[in-house]
Image: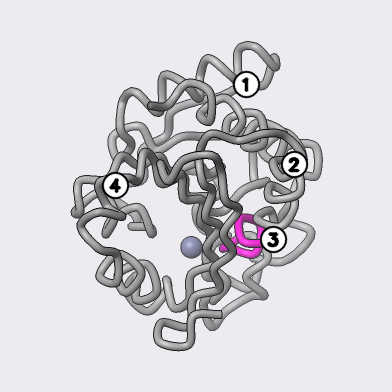
């Protein structure tokens, strides 16, 4: 636990200090239980750590559960503010997991760095997992914002569509909003994607 920011941070060292950061947020809105937004993302972090830890890694992976996303990206903004210029330069990607399992996996294309989206679609194709681009510029923001402002490559992975958007921040944000097949596919895609980035990213 990083006492200053309230974020929960776990580092998995690799052979180099080139870094890939994976994040989700553990706070939630007043309405509903926050299972979708964003326990669905934050709770995958330990499983992704487990998936990566037993194989040799080039990159150092940093898993961050951010605080206070819903209060204006407070945790992620503090995290980026506390990074040194060297840490920023060494960060090859920030992968954000936000609101998974509502539908099949989506990527916020207009927010994400094109090269990272290309790699995600390559992995999705390899695994036979459907992946669609759905932009949510008009309806929300997420923890990729401060990273992008610091010129760090980002990708925002979610599952929100026009039809499911209203579940967020409502009493309907609870366990039965999750489709477990879609949620498992999101986990599998994220796990393979991180392993792929480890090999493919500089
Ligand atoms: Zn959220």
Q: First in sequence: mark 3 or mark 4? A: 3
- Nearer mark to the viewer, of 4 and 2: 2
Residue 159: horizontal and vertical position, in percent? 56, 42
- Nearer mark to the viewer, of 3 and 4: 3
Q: First in sequence: mark 2 or mark 1? A: 2
Q: Which residue is mark 1?
A: 130
Q: Is residue 14 magenta?
A: no
Q: Is mark 1 within 8 Å of ligand 1?
A: no
Q: CA distance from mark 4 to mark 2?
A: 31 Å
Residue 45, above or below 163: below
Q: First in sequence: mark 4 or mark 1? A: 1
What residue is at 32 percent from the left and 45 percent from the top?
90
Residue 185: horizontal and vertical position, in percent? 72, 33
Tell whether 2 sits left or right of 74: right
Magenta range:
37-43
Q: Looking at the rendering, which quadrant does residue 202 occupy?
A: top left
Q: Which residue is mark 3?
A: 43
């Amino acid at each position: 636990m990083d006492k200053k920011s309230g974020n929960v941070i776990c580092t998995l060292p690799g052979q180099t200090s080139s870094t890939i950061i994976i994040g989700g947020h553990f706070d939630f809105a007043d309405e509903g239980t926050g299972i979708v937004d964003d326990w669905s993302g934050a709770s995958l972090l330990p499983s992704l750590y487990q998936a990566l830890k037993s194989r040799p890694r080039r990159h150092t992976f940093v898993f961050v559960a951010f605080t206070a996303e819903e209060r204006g990206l407070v945790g992620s903004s503090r995290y980026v503010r506390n990074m040194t210029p060297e840490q920023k330069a060494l960060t090859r990607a920030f992968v954000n997991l936000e609101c998974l399992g509502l539908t099949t996996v989506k990527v916020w294309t207009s927010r994400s760095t094109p090269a990272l989206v290309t790699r995600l679609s390559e992995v999705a194709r390899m695994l036979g997992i459907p992946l669609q681009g759905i932009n949510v510029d008009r309806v929300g923001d997420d923890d990729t914002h401060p990273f992008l402002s610091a010129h760090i490559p980002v990708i925002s992975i979610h599952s929100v569509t026009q039809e499911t958007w209203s579940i967020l921040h409502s009493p309907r944000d609870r366990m039965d909003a999750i489709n477990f097949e879609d949620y498992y596919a999101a986990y599998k895609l994220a796990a393979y994607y991180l392993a792929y980035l480890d090999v493919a990213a500089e």
